[in-house]
Image (cartoon, rainbow, N blue to C red):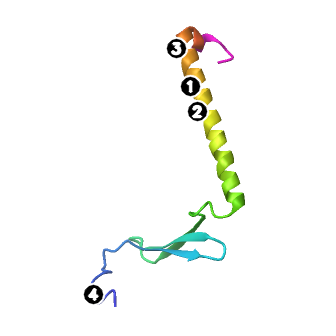
Amino acid sequence: ELHDQRWIVRGTRAIFIDFTVYNANINLFCVIRLLVEFPATGGAIPSWSFRTVKLIRYVTARDYFIMACECIFLLFILYYIVEEALEIKRHKPSYFKSFWN
């Protein structure tokens, strides 16, 4: 039918089929890409990729604990970035000459 409606013609080099499925029992999405390539030499080369991701991350109490740990980690990173920026401002070029920086 795709040939009849001219979606696939002689010059078609690839067909992609992308779709996403969701499993509510384990809260996972699976992004699926099916690909068929038609090289100029003839034939068909099929390939596929499956990516499983957890898009709804924070559901249970344990998930919220993980979120709190991630926020604390982010605050530490931001604090040390600011601290290093102030040290660079204070020492200017000599900051980069020190091995320990």
Residues at marks 3 and 1, CA–CA distance in whole angstroms: 10 Å
Mark earlier in primary sequence (1, 4): 4
Residue identifier under label 1: 82
* Spatial separation of the CA atoms under disc 4 and disc 2: 57 Å
Q: Mark 1 to mark 4: distance in Å?
A: 61 Å
The magenta span reads: 96-101
Point 61% across, 39% down: residue: 74
Of 66 and 8, nearer the camera is 66
Image coordinates for residue 2, horizontal then vertical, percent: 34, 86
Labels 4, 2: front one: 2
Q: Which residue lies at the image location 69% right of the left edge and 52% below the top edge?
A: 66
Residue 39 coordinates in the image, percent (x, y): 42, 71
Tell me the element at label 3. helix
Q: Position of residue 15 (x, y in %)?
A: 41, 74
Q: Are marks 3 and 1 in contact (CB under 8 Å)?
A: no
Q: Label 4 belongs to which residue?
A: 5
Q: Which one is nearer the viewer's eye here, 86 or 49? A: 86
Query: Magenta: predominant secondary structure element?
Result: loop
The verdict on residue 98 being magenta is yes
Q: Which residue is labeled 3 in the image? A: 89
Do labels 3 and 2 touch, CB within 8 Å?
no
